[in-house]
Image (spheres, rainbow, N blue to C red):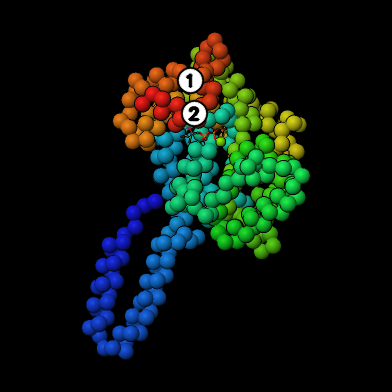
Amino acid sequence: MKARPWTALLHCILVSGLIVEAIEPVSTSLLLGTGAAMLGRKIYRYLYETCDENWVNFNATGLKYDLDTKLYGQHVAAQVILKAVTGFMKNENPKKPLVLSLHGWTGTGKNFVSQLIAENIYEKGMSSSFVHLFTATAHFPHEMHINTYKSQLQNWVKGNVTICPRSMFIFDEMDKMHPGLIDSIKPYLDFYESLDGVSYRQAIFIFLSNAGGENIVQVALDFWRDGREREEMQLKDLETALSLSVFNNRNSGFWHTGLIDKNLVDFFVPFLPLEYKHIVQCGLSEMVSKGHVPDKEVVEMMAHDLNYFPKEERVFSMQGCKVIPSRLDFYV
Ligand SMILES: Nc1ncnc2c1ncn2[C@@H]1O[C@H](COP(=O)(O)OP(=O)(O)OP(=O)(O)O)[C@@H](O)[C@H]1O
Ligand SMILES: [Mg+2]
């Protein structure tokens, strides 16, 4: 969170008090009363998160900077996300909420990117009361309670968008979510002006899943085996792989939901499997965030000991950058 200008505020109180005292007593108390009310409102806004530009304010440059410098090895995802989010946030009259579906191998940055988006829209980032994270296995674990979950989820989304139209809903483990539950939020993702008097058009929905991850890996591996640069890979090279595994697969949760044939998802974002060099980058930044001086030798030792696949070529990290925070502790 940015530092608040408390000293400036205190200075204001003192100066306005002195000026008011110099005027006659009746108007002084009147002025003081109004002043105090205004000040009270101002302080309240400083202390408590409200759904206005003090707390909800999109920073396009910040998002670009974060995607460029903090996210490693995801040039396709970074580009799609920047365009999608910036375009949506700058549009004063979007026709539907923004719906992103992030796909890829474990530990490649799907939750991390959601966090970067949240941090560049909400002053409080992921801790904002306007950002809601649902994890299928934690929040909706029992299939027999599906009807309760449906109405709870609908009420939650509706209630929160009523409080703040610029709300963000992240659904993790989307591939483990009951299709009926996904269906229950479908109306909110659509092109309606409003539903029961609530407009969802300013809201952002992000779905995270490993669905399609293996096909994305196959494309990346083919590139590598052909001796082509990873950065040459484009969205169109990966789209077919994604659609084959996610959209045309009758076993995938997505297929059953009708999210796809109704075109409710604006962008399917592929996350590439990470290579040794990205693991080193993650390790170095993890050292910094733990307060250590970044040491390449230490990080390389840790990166070397991790598992890579395919077995013979050892190209991609099995767990991505996910295990680094705990692994690094053994090496520093
Ligand atoms: N591409 C990346 N660039 C920089 N850091 C990354 C990247 N991928 C992962 N990380 C780091 O690893 C941590 C774990 O990654 P994250 O939770 O985003 O993975 P995920 O893709 O959501 O995996 P899963 O599919 O298992 O949920 C992140 O918090 C971040 O610190
Ligand atoms: Mg995740």
- Residue placed furthest toward the top: 312
Q: Which mark is residue 95?
A: none
* Disc on the earlier residue, 1 or 2: 1
Query: Mark 1 vs ligand 1: CB under 8 Å?
Result: no
Residue 93, how many percent across, how many down?
56, 56
Instruction: Tell whether 281 sits left or right of 79.
Output: left
* Quarter of the image with the C terminus in it: top left
Q: Would you identify the image quadrant in which residue 325 lies?
A: top left
Relative height, residue 152 to residue 306 (above, below) = below
Q: Which residue is mark 1?
A: 306
Instruction: Determine if residue 99 is in view.
Output: no
Label 1: which secondary element: loop
Residue 143, how many percent across, how many down?
74, 42
Q: Residue at x 49, y 35 (%)?
A: 78
Residue 234, how many percent across, how many down?
54, 28
| Amino acid of disc 1 | Leu
Q: Which residue is mark 2?
A: 323
Compute the Cα span from label 1 to label 2. Answer: 9 Å
Q: CB of mark 1 within 8 Å of CB of mark 2?
A: yes
Instruction: Tell whether 161 sits left or right of 262.
Output: left
**Badge 2 density bin: few <14, some 14–19, many ≥20, Cα 10 Å:** some
Relative height, residue 42 to residue 247 (above, below) = below
Relative height, residue 122 to residue 300 (above, below) = below
Residue 34, how many percent across, how many down?
38, 79
Q: Residue at x 44, y 37 (%)?
A: 67
Q: Residue at x 64, y 29 (%)?
A: 212
| Amino acid of disc 2 | Val
The residue closer to the viewer here, 297 or 90, is: 297
Q: Residue at x 65, y 49 (%)?
A: 189
